[in-house]
Amino acid sequence: MASLLFTILLGTILTLLIITNIFVYVTGPARKAEVDDEALFRSVVNAYQLVDATFLNRHFHQRITYVAQIGADNDKLIFYDEEGLVFLLFDTPVRPQVINELLASEQIMEKDISYGYFKTPVFVIDNPNRLQYINVSGETVFFLKKGD
């Protein structure tokens, strides 16, 4: 009876250690990155006195780029780096037809689309099958087939 209780106690302790490790080492860094991104966004909003700003996403290709929308109608995109330096203010582009076709054919989903920067502003399509950058005129400027 004592060995059964000892085994249950050890199993419980092991389970708690595994859950703690998952929480700290898997979700912890992601949450820290979110907090850091939000703090940087707030500092950019304050430094540039942005009105009606919304953080959109973080993109990495050769350097980290952050994207936010500004304006009452979200009609401008603002691109800034990890130091909080704004390097581009851009009119929010209309989605190219090629992206609408990919959505219609169900090759991608709405959640797979974001903005990024690859020498110019691009639409970033990132899902388990592809990583694709499409510029505002609809040309693919980078494509990586994933999987298989």
Image (tube, helix red, strand yellow):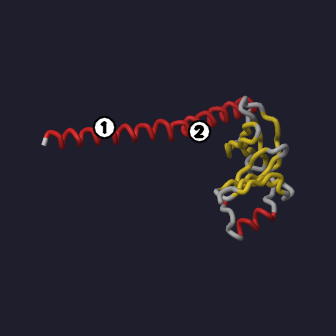
Q: Is residue 137 above or below residue 120?
A: below
Query: In the picture, which quadrant includes the N terminus?
Result: top left
The image quarter containing residue 47 is top right
Q: Which residue is mark 1?
A: 13
**Element under disc 1:** helix
Q: 50 or 121: which is nearer to us? A: 121
Q: What residue sits 68% from the left and 45% below the top?
A: 57
Q: What residue sits 76% from the left and 62% below the top?
A: 99
Left or right: 125 as drawn, with respect to 140: left
Residue 77 screen position, x and y as percent: 77, 45
Q: Earlier in the sequence, mark 1 or mark 2?
A: 1
Left or right: 68 as drawn, with respect to 142: left
Q: What residue sits 66% from the left and 62% below the top?
A: 109
Q: Residue flagged by tag 1: what amino acid is it?
A: Ile
**For the residues carrying marks 1 and 2, which lies nearer the camera in this image?**
1
Q: What residue sits 77% from the left and 54% below the top?
A: 143
Q: Residue flagged by tag 2: what amino acid is it?
A: Glu
Q: Are marks 1 and 2 in contact (CB under 8 Å)?
A: no
Q: Is residue 111 visible?
A: no
Q: Which residue is mark 2?
A: 34
Residue extending farthest to the left is 1
